[in-house]
Amino acid sequence: MARGRHTWWWWLSRTLVALVAGLILVQAWFAANILWYRSHAPASTAFMRERLAELRSKDPKAQLRYEWVPYAKISPNLKRAIVASEDATFMEHDGFDWEGIRKAREKNDAKGRVVAGGSTITQQLAKNLFLSPARSYIRKGQEAIITVMLEHLLDKRRILELYLNVIEWGNGVFGAEAAAHRYYGVTASALSTEQAARLAAMTPSPRRFERNPHSAYLSGRVGTIMARMPSAVVP
């Protein structure tokens, strides 16, 4: 009996050690990729690969629209619009906007469903780079760990540069340069105040707004973002 109990504990301890070692290796892989992104553009992201698989299930020859551009070649209008729209305290927080999270939770509780997220630009970058759109506590936990890594291993300018280059802006459209060409026929550096505000307004649901570019909600949101842009602080 004692021998059987000893064997059971031996296997349990070995399993736990293996799980912890695996978890550490996974986090090390994320950290190594983030360090690589300090000076290299992502060839693709988790979101891009998922969207491309969806597109190719219908058209095997489908391709994404994605072209990396450096921070200096992205219009200041778009930088301010994104920060004003999605993360007003971007320059101040450590990756998490705790007040925003609290307000989002209150809104969701009042509505009985998810109507607000409260995620920062850094959290959204973590999700876009490495994770799936599926919601789960495990994914949110991993997102939080990656968010901490991003904030500690990259500066705010690089975080915003990465975000503006990899976020989704339509069906198969990723990043500021592709979005500027797709909707306005210009480069990301040439986006006007209104154009930038409209792109920022699209980000919560880009594929839906791509199909409904003149919706009343979108137009109203553009006005709100434009009013906030002058006070937005960007790297």
Image (cartoon, helix red, strand yellow):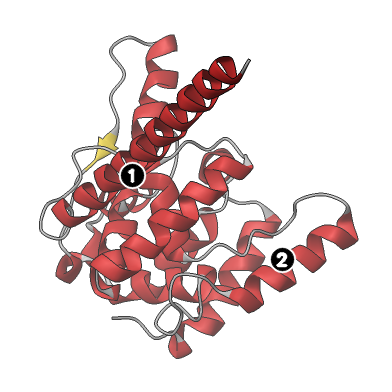
Q: Nearer the viewer, residue 44 or 190?
A: 44
| Mark 1 in CB contact with mark 2 (< 8 angstroms) | no
Q: Is residue 87 left or right of residue 235?
A: right
Picture layout, residue 22 above or below residue 120: above
Residue named by callout 1: 24
Mark 1 and mark 2 lie on one chain; the one further toward the N terminus is 1
Disc 1 element = helix
Residue 98 falls in which quadrant of the image?
bottom right
Which corner quadrant holds the N terminus?
top right
Q: Residue furthest bottom?
A: 231
Q: Point out residue 170 in the picture as x, y percentages from the top left corner.
A: 44, 40
Disc 2 element = helix
Picture layout, residue 7 above or below residue 184: above
Disc 1 from disc 2: Cα separation: 32 Å
- Residue depicted at x 47% and y 82%: 229
Q: Residues within 10 Å of mark 2 (few under 14, many from 20)?
A: some
- Label placed on residue 104: 2
Say whether residue 194 is visible.
Answer: no
- Residue depicted at x 46% and y 34%: 16
- Residue depicted at x 53% and y 83%: 228
Q: Nearer the viewer, residue 116 or 19?
A: 19
Which corner quadrant holds the C terminus?
bottom left
Q: Point out residue 21 in the picture as x, y percentages from the top left corner.
A: 34, 38
Q: Point out residue 148 in the picture as x, y percentages from the top left corner.
A: 39, 64
Picture layout, residue 146 above or below residue 130: below
Q: Nearer the viewer, mark 1 or mark 2?
A: 1
